[in-house]
Amino acid sequence: MSVESCTRFLRVAAEDPRIRQQMKALTGVEEVIRLARADGYDFTVGDLRAASAKIAAEAARRQAAAPRDADARRDVDDRRDVDDRCDVGDRRDADRPEPAAGRVYHYEYDLDELPGFAPIIDELPRLKIKPPTVDLARFHEAFREEDLASTSLAPSGPEYRAWRDRVAAEEADDAGGAGGVRRDFHLINLDEHVAHPGYDDYLAAKTRVVAALEEVFGAEVRFSGSMWYPPSSYRLWHTNEDQPGWRMYIVDVDDEFADPEHTSFFRYQNPATGELVTLRERPRMVRFFKIEQEPDRLLWHCIVNPTDRHRWSFGFVVPEHWAERLPERS
């Protein structure tokens, strides 16, 4: 196990089409380590961090040493001169439109109605796994009613901020809470469970789904997360602002909801109005929304499964032009 072994693997992964495609399906560090071991590379999480930093530093040095094109340099300098003279930077900020109250912040489809999604539907049974390495008894013990109740509070409001600050203080005093369990993340990240017999089939299915989605969108697609929400699970308010761009989530459950008013749901706060918008869910649906970084555009959102159904969601980073490849929504 060594940094050298990891560095070799990362260099091969950047060049080998098979491994590069598999890497698009990975979201967890343990997944990367397992994939590398299958190809004869052995390293630890620490080795991976060190190797990644080494490669990034080498790339930065190469970029800094590369000669700049003289015309491009003059163009940049000319633009800076114009900006300085005309205060363009300030004007750009002033002209940037504010979030509009009537803006659409999400788009939803039935999975079965989307052209080109038949291969993804075929893979769903291999994606919707319940790894035997998950300790469900311990999982259910970590449930907190007050945490679930926080999803009904507006994240911009004083009541939520007071609750959040109190929880943060409790976790700091408790060195991470009960057994180090994340209170904001009461669900199962499937990609953290790689030591079970079904993982290889699961990874193969993920890789095929990436390829199928790239056919649909005509551009690169990457997994951003694979989550299993057992009964009474939730992901508390968050923004993902450090990972901007369009997201697509495929959502499914293990059975129809008996009551259409009692389902799992996705909730977000409208950045323009502060309104809490609750989106009830149904089997085999697809949701798109955009993650932004500007403070006045942050999309605070949470996910709750208060039912006795099992819910799965599979997230993807999709290209900006995704809507051009799908039917229009009214």
Image (cartoon, grey):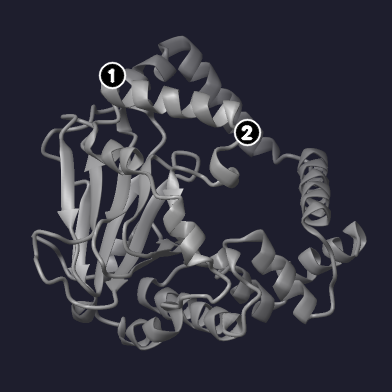
How far is mark 2 from mark 1, CA to CA? 25 Å
Residue 240 drawn above or below residue 287: above
The amino acid beneath tag 1 is: Pro
**Viewer-nearest of discs 2 and 1:** 2
The residue lying at 28 percent from left, 73 percent from top is 253
The residue lying at 42 percent from left, 58 percent from top is 140
Residue 20 image position (x, y, % from top left): 65, 72
Q: Residue 175's mark? A: 2
From the viewer's perspective, is 172 left or right of 156? right
Label 1 secondary element:
helix
Residue 61 image position (x, y, % from top left): 82, 42
From the viewer's perspective, is 47 left or right of 90? right
**Residue 252 seen in render:** yes
CB contact under 8 Å: marks 2 and 1: no
Categorize mark 2 by other alpha carbons within 10 Å: few (<14), some (14-19), many (20+): few
User: Which of the image's four quarters has the C terminus?
Assistant: bottom left
The amino acid beneath tag 2 is: Ala
Q: Hey, which quadrant is residue 34 in on the image?
A: bottom right
Say which of 33 and 16 sits in front: 33
Residue 93 drawn above or below residue 140: above
Categorize mark 1 by other alpha carbons within 10 Å: few (<14), some (14-19), many (20+): few
The residue lying at 36 percent from left, 26 percent from top is 163
The residue lying at 78 percent from left, 56 percent from top is 48
Say which of 107 and 203 sits in front: 203
From the viewer's perspective, is 118 left or right of 20? left
Residue 155 drawn above or below residue 148: above
Q: Hey, which quadrant is residue 314 in on the image?
A: bottom left
Residue 125 drawn above or below residue 276: below
Q: Hey, which quadrant is residue 77 in on the image?
A: top right
Q: Residue 158's mark? A: 1
Residue 138 image position (x, y, % from top left): 51, 59
